Image: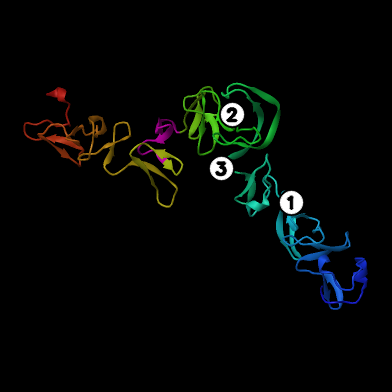
Amino acid sequence: MSPRCPVTQFKQLFALQVDACSSAHSLICIDGRCGCNGTISTLSIAESKCVGLVGESCVQGSCIPSAICSNNMCACADDKYRVNHQDGYICANKKSMNMKCTSDMECLVTNEFPLKCVQGSCICEPTGSVYATVQKFFNEGYYNVEYGHWSDIFYSQCVGKAGKTCIDNLCTENARCNANTGVCECYGSDFESYPWNGLCQKKYGASPCNKKDCGDGLACVENVCKCKYGALQIFSGGKCVSIVDAPCNGNTSCIENAVCEFFPNTLVGSCKCKPGYTDDKKRGCKVAFGEACQSDDQCDDIAGLKCVNEKCECENYLSRFNESGRVCVGLVGGWSSMYDKEHF
């Protein structure tokens, strides 16, 4: 028992039939009067008793109004989070979509809205979901997502990205939830998933299209999905890449064997051939003179080089490579790449 205190009006308020401040009711003797132990409880005027603070033991099964008693501890419910208050911790309502936040614990997490705090706002968990307004697709009993039926209702919530787990049976636009695997899959031969954004968009060459249909790096040109920078790019390795001397940036790749050389103090530049390579007739990059090769088509075609003994060399042994002129120059009696063989 705590130190004895005289019967007071505060003690009578609790209708406690005890001779001393009851620790079971979180009472302590303060300046000769029984009061709530402020380190673990506070007075509830509505209940006329002490109630437990968040993170402390429940007082006779009771906690502050914003908290719940769980396993005899005062805690925040799933839809609330702990906030430091002048009188101790309290529980505040978790924040919904697009509300400001400072940590993940502040954001609401439900089946429909698995939110995370990203750059100061509560948004759909970014690695596996995205916010969208879509219809629900049902294909129970079918392995192929091409078969099934759509609901008549549109849902606005977090939905699964392509290749990720379905959320509440919902997926990003142009994707369907495979009931057998629980994974979102693109449907239709014109669509493919893009790992960097998790969306299903029309691939290179797909038609018809609009400006929102085409995948990353593509644009709808003359009703066909093509590389957005036209003649300055080619489609290679499943993506659009910039040719030599074409603009590039951190999000734009260069043609094979080229790199983006950034302009001073900027995030943009132009594609240049890597060391050991040189630009060719089509503004690609070919193996330069003296470098290793495996076939003739890898070697500098402007200089007329061939793959000789696994190195790009002048084809005629009576020729020598002139670096400044980028040409094979014939010795006396030899052939020069400055002139076409047909002239001889």
Residue drawn at 68 percent across, 43 percent down: 110
> How far separated are the C-alphas under marks 1 and 2?
34 Å
- Mark 1 vs 2: CB contact within 8 A: no
The residue pinned by badge 3 equals 127
Residue 244 part of the magenta-drawn span:
yes
Q: Amino acid at mark 3?
A: Thr
Circle 2 packing at 10 Å, graded few (<14), some (14-19), many (20+), is few
Please tell me in which quadrant of the rendered image residue 307 appears.
top left
Q: Residue 250's x, y, as percent?
A: 45, 44
Q: Is 9 on the left or on the right of 151, as rendered? A: right
Report the residue that reaches farthest toward the bottom: 31
Please tell me in which quadrant of the rendered image residue 258 appears.
top left
Mark positioned earlier in the residue sequence (2 or 3): 3
Q: Residue 319's x, y, as percent?
A: 12, 35
Magenta span: 229-247
Q: Residue 316's x, y, as percent?
A: 12, 31
The residue pinned by badge 2 equals 180
Circle 1 packing at 10 Å, graded few (<14), some (14-19), many (20+), is some
Q: Is 72 on the left or on the right of 169, as rendered? A: right
Depth check, mark 2 against mark 3: the one in front is 2
Q: Residue 103's x, y, as percent?
A: 63, 54
Q: Which secondary structure, mark 3? A: loop
Q: Amino acid at mark 2?
A: Asn
Q: Which secondary structure, mark 2? A: loop
Residue 172 part of the magenta-drawn span:
no
Residue 162 against residue 52 in the figure, above or below: above
The one nearer the camera, 49 or 232, is 49
The one nearer the camera, 185 or 56, is 56
Please tell me in which quadrant of the rendered image residue 201 appears.
top right
Q: Amino acid at mark 1?
A: Ala
Depth check, mark 3 against mark 1: the one in front is 1
